[in-house]
C-alpha cells in the first residue's frame, strides 16, 4: 500500500468524524461500506449499513453537539487508529471522555469501526455533566424572594 493510499484512508476517517461533528449523518454515511461492522466495546457488533445507519441516527437525535478532538492518528495500510477526546452535548449536559478507535478502510470506505472507552472516565464525565446541567438550570432561574408580601 502506498503512502498516498494510507493518507487517503486517514482522510476518510477524519472527514467521517468531521461529518459527525456537524451532526450530518447523511454525509457521514457516504464514507461507510455497505458491510460496515461497528462495535462500541464491550457491546455487541452492529453489522450492515442499515443497522449502522439506524444506530448513528439515534446517536445524533439524542445529542445536540459532538466534537472529536483527535490527539493522535496513525495509519498502517487499511488500518487507521485514532486516540481522541470526544465531547458529547445534550442541551445543558456535557461529557468529555477519552476514546481510542480502530477503523479499517477498504476502497475508500470504512468497513470497520471499533471504539474502546475508558468507562470510568465516561461515567465520571457523565456525572460531572449532570451536575453542570443542574447548576446551569439553577443559574437561569430568576431569583424568587421567599418573603411574603403584605
Image (cartoon, helix red, strand yellow):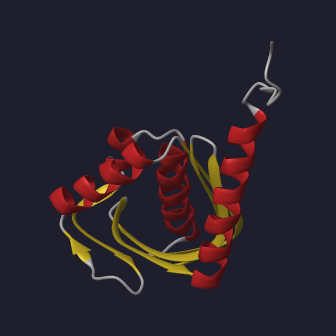
Q: Is residue 131 left or right of residue 32?
A: right
Q: Is residue 11 left or right of residue 31?
A: right
The image quarter containing residue 85 is: bottom right
Q: Residue at x 28, y 82 (%)?
A: 44
Instruction: State the quadrant of the C terminus.
Output: top right
As drawn, 118 above or below 51: below
* Nearer to us in this view, 144 or 92: 144
- Expressed as whole percent of the image width and height from the top left, the position of residue 84 reads 66, 68
As drawn, 85 above or below 136: below
As drawn, 119 above or below 98: below
- Number of marks in the rendered image: 0
Taking the view exactly as shown, the residue that stands out farthest to the top is 150
Q: Residue at x 53, y 69 (%)?
A: 6
The image quarter containing residue 48 is: bottom left
Whether residue 77 can be seen here: no
As drawn, 94 above or below 35: above
* Nearer to us in this view, 106 or 137: 137
Whether residue 127 can be seen here: yes
- Expressed as whole percent of the image width and height from the top left, the position of residue 74 reads 63, 75
Q: Residue at x 52, y 54 (%)?
A: 17
Taking the view exactly as shown, the residue that stands out farthest to the bottom is 42
- Expressed as whole percent of the image width and height from the top left, the position of residue 117 reads 56, 79
Taking the view exactly as shown, the residue that stands out farthest to the front is 150
- Expressed as whole percent of the image width and height from the top left, the position of residue 55 reads 29, 58
Q: Is residue 89 left or right of residue 128?
A: left
* Nearer to us in this view, 44 or 89: 89
Q: Residue at x 20, y 59 (%)?
A: 49
Amino acid at each position: 500500500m502506498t503512502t498516498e493510499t494510507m493518507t487517503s484512508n486517514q482522510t476518510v476517517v477524519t472527514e467521517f468524524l468531521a461529518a459527525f461533528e456537524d451532526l450530518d449523518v447523511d454525509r457521514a454515511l457516504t464514507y461507510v461500506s455497505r458491510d460496515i461492522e461497528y462495535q462500541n466495546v464491550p457491546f455487541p457488533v452492529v453489522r450492515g449499513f442499515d443497522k449502522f445507519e439506524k444506530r448513528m441516527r439515534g446517536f445524533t437525535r439524542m445529542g445536540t453537539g459532538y466534537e472529536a478532538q483527535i490527539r493522535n492518528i496513525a495509519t498502517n495500510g487499511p488500518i487507521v487508529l485514532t486516540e481522541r477526546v470526544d465531547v458529547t452535548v445534550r442541551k445543558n449536559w456535557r461529557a468529555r471522555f477519552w476514546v481510542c478507535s480502530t477503523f479499517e478502510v477498504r476502497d475508500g470506505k470504512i468497513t470497520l469501526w471499533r471504539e474502546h472507552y475508558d468507562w470510568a472516565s465516561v461515567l465520571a464525565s457523565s456525572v460531572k455533566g449532570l451536575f453542570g446541567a443542574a447548576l446551569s438550570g439553577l443559574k437561569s432561574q430568576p431569583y424568587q424572594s421567599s418573603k411574603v408580601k403584605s
